[in-house]
Amino acid sequence: LVPEATMAQRISRAKRTVSGVRLDRPGDVGTVLRVLYLVFNEGYSGDVDLAAEAIRLTRRLAAAVDHPE
């Protein structure tokens, strides 16, 4: 519900914030997985193909960490 430029700025800021962050504390991976699930659901029902991006990011996360989920 915000202009595309505003969303692009938010995404850029979020990427800068999380770049280089390690997922080594308990619950970190689970939190990221929950967010990816929400992104997938939003993309599945929306106009933008966020579902494919959520799947791509989830696959990258699965390859990067050893987590049972």
Image (spheres, grey):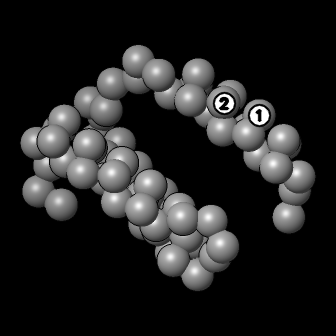
Question: Residue at left 56%, top 29%?
Answer: 15
Say which of 13 and 34 sits in front.
Answer: 13
Disc 1 vs disc 2: Cβ atoms closer than 8 Å?
Answer: yes
The three-letter code of the residue at mark 1 reads Gln
Label 1 to label 2: alpha-carbon separation = 5 Å
**Numbered-mark total:** 2
Name the residue beneath numbered marker 1: 9
Mark yes or no: residue 47 visible. Answer: yes
- Determine whether, in the image, residue 19 is placed left or right of residue 1: left
Position above or below: 25 against 48: above
**Farthest residue toward the top?**
20
- Determine whether, in the image, residue 25 is placed left or right of residue 38: left
Question: Residue at left 54%, top 65%?
Answer: 49
Mark yes or no: residue 34 visible. Answer: no
Q: At which x and y percent is residue 36?
A: 43, 58
Say which of 54 and 66 sits in front.
Answer: 54
Position above or below: 7 against 55: above
Position above or below: 16 against 32: above
The three-letter code of the residue at mark 2 reads Ser
Q: At which x and y percent is residue 61?
A: 27, 43
Q: At which x and y percent is residue 3?
A: 89, 52
Name the residue beneath numbered marker 2: 12
